[in-house]
Amino acid sequence: MPGRTVSVRAGFIVGPHDNTDRFSSWIERAARNERLLVPGAADAPFQLIDVRDIAAWIVAAAEARRQGAYNVTGPRDPVTVLDVARACIAGTESRAVPVVVPSDAVRAAGIAAWEQLPFWFEPELYGLVEMDCTRARTTGLRTRPLIETVRDTYAWLRTTDHERKIILPPELERAALQAAALL
């Protein structure tokens, strides 16, 4: 259907009712009021988009009969994994403290990237979360503040009973933090 379609290249879609638990697992770990393991490098880039923001843009793009490919993710200003951890802490009104732990130490503690700890990017994967979204922004893409997404997702998490898919046992997280402190 050349000339009649819009291709939406979404990043990681998060927000209330996201049953993947990728982002939700970060929020729930932050809410524990304990040290929060942040794997890898503090300045690792991070992109995600609230489902409500991408949905609004898709509807507007359809109504405007947009064509072509668009990278549609956020937030507007670049953020790091440490920024996301801090937003999760603030959005849950937690007293947690983010602790950046080098990837080697996290792996040595027996934690598996993406299986138990989503959004753990190594430098060779940074391109996945460094997409240029200028084209979508010039056509109306707006992204809400990350803390709003965290707050709304946390409110939903406290009311849902869906079975969690990603679980980093608190004792394993504590062991990794303790081992990293000895480095």
Image (cartoon, rainbow, N blue to C red):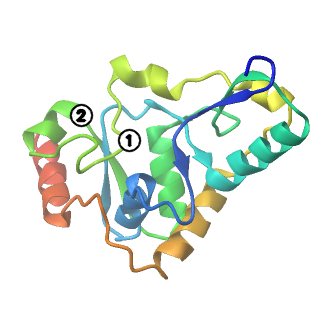
Which residue corresponds to mark 1?
Answer: 119
Q: Is residue 125 above or below residue 74?
A: above
Which residue, as the protein is rendered here, is positioned at the far front?
1
Sequence-earlier tag: 2 or 1: 2
Which quadrant of the figure has residue 1? top right
Q: Taking 29 as reference, is 110 left or right? A: left
Contact check, label 2 and label 1, Cβ < 8 Å? no
Query: Can you give x and y, in whole percent of width and height, for residue 121 in the image?
Result: 35, 31
Answer yes or no: is residue 144 visible. no
Residue 178's spot in the image, x, y percent? 13, 53
Q: Nearer the viewer, mark 2 or mark 1?
A: 1
| In-front residue for pair 24/66 | 66
Residue 32: quarter of image: bottom left
Foreground residue among 19 and 155:
19
Residue at x-position 55% and y-position 47%: 13
Question: Which quarter of the image is occupied by the C terminus?
Answer: top left
Relative placement, left or right, of 112 versus 118 is left
What amino acid is labelled 1 in the image? Phe
Is residue 21 left or right of 183 when viewed as pictured?
A: right
Residue labelled with disc 2: 102
Q: Amino acid at mark 2?
A: Pro
**Residue at 42% of width from left, 68% of height from top?**
95
Check disc 2: other Cα within 10 Å, few if <14, some if 14-19, many if 20+. Answer: some
Q: CA distance from mark 2 to mark 1?
A: 14 Å
Rate crowding at label 1 as few (under 14), some (14 to 19) or many (20 or more) other CA atoms within 10 Å.
some
In the rendered image, the vertical position of residue 73 relative to residue 95, given as above or below: above
* Residue 160 visible, this angle: yes
